[in-house]
Image (cartoon, coloured by chain):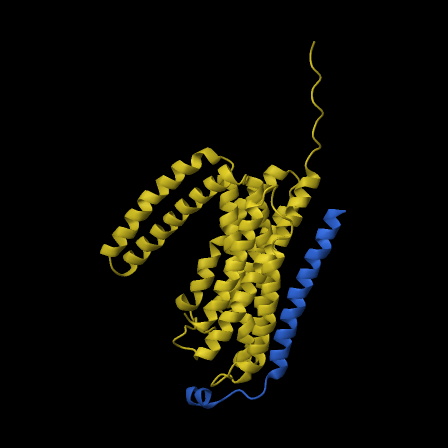
Amino acid sequence: MIIFATQGVIQGGWEYVWTAYITTWVVLAGYGVSLWWRARKEAR
Amino acid sequence: MPAGYIFGVVGLFIFALTALAATLRPGGVRANWEHGIGLYALGLLVYGQYGGLYLAPPDTWMADVARILYVHVPAAWISMVAFTWAFAAAFGALMLERPKSLPVLSAATAVPGIGLIGLAMALTGVQRGLAAFFGILLILTAVECALLWIGNRFFNWTSDTLDHISEASTEVGVVLGVLLLFLGSVFSRPTFNVYWTWDPRLTASAVMVLTFVGVSLLRSSVDDPITRRTWSNVATILAYINIPVTYMSVKWWRTIHQLQSTPDTLSSDMTFWLRLNAWAFLFLSIWFVARRWRIARARALAEAPPELPPAPEIP
């Protein structure tokens, strides 16, 4: 089992990479927008 | 100096310069001074994410999947940094309720702290580690008390100022913590063949995020401002106890989650892109906390009772 694990290289996986990066941008941008929106609401 | 640090030094310089210029400006603090560091963070983030996706080398065994680590690891580090800000600010908010005691407290913690550091040098093994840990803790407490005293005396810091920073940092830490858990889950599927398992590190991270969600809920559920400030700051300090446990969990109870990598176990290219993204997350978090702090301050001003008219003079 250990020999098998150390000989294997993960193939592909770009769909997971894109999911991670897109989610990061969506969360960070979404939080930034929420701060801007809440600041505007408080300023009124 | 390693190349990854230069971006951090530049960012810290921008932050220090804009913050200092805003604080010392005649006529009060300039609004929106934090946008400089926010723009710098955005530039670093775009460059860092591009590098993580296309310029960093693939890992020997995990190949391209390892690129997820350029967002997962910075989210983990900076969520813990944000919770540390929340903890330090919560402690400061409680201490500033009695600002006159700060010089005495600073001296009373510095002296045994220096003594414990000296003792640690003479000890070995676990005893040395414990003496050094508590020594550093006491010295950090002394430094924070001294800074709080300076802030209170010269820059008009109050318990509310620090309370708003704690509130803002907790929220930013929770956002990054939720992102950390999601990214860890996405990374875990192609590498460990599971989205989630009750590994000690994963469980401790989930508990860390949930406890700070609890602190935010407590803050939003108490109406009286003074009670809310005290309760939520005490809860923040209690919630922070889990952070060192979360950090050390991979060493103490290792199962599926890997040990912390070091520059010795990574190629220099990988270390560079990891550091760059970590700086981007750090400076973006500073911007988030500053923006969220303004909202907390505006809300506190809105809920403050109106000032009473001056009492009529008694003839």
Quadrant that contains the C terminus of chain B: top right
Chain A drawn in what color?
blue
Residue B235 drawn at (x, y percent): 54, 47
State left or right for residue B259 relative to residue B207.
left
Which residue reaches farthest left? B122
The residue lying at 31 percent from left, 43 percent from top is: B111
Q: Quadrant of residue B224?
A: top right
Residue B39 drawn at (x, y percent): 62, 63
Which residue reaches farthest top? B315
Query: Does the rendering let one see residue B195?
Result: no
Viewer-closest of B286 and B43: B43
Viewer-closest of B169 and B24: B24
Q: Quadrant of residue B261?
A: bottom left
Viewer-closest of A7 and B134: B134
Using the image, determine if residue B4 lies above or below residue B131: below
Total labels drawn? 0
Query: Does the rendering let one see residue B60?
Result: yes
State left or right for residue B309 relative to residue B240.
right
The residue lying at 34 percent from left, 50 percent from top is: B135
Residue B204 drawn at (x, y percent): 50, 63
Using the image, determine if residue B238 lies above or below residue B278: above
The residue lying at 56 percent from left, 65 percent from top is: B281
Viewer-closest of B300 and B56: B56
The residue lying at 64 percent from left, 42 percent from top is: B222
Which residue reaches farthest front? B26
Chain B drawn in what color?
yellow
Quadrant that contains the N terminus of chain B: bottom left
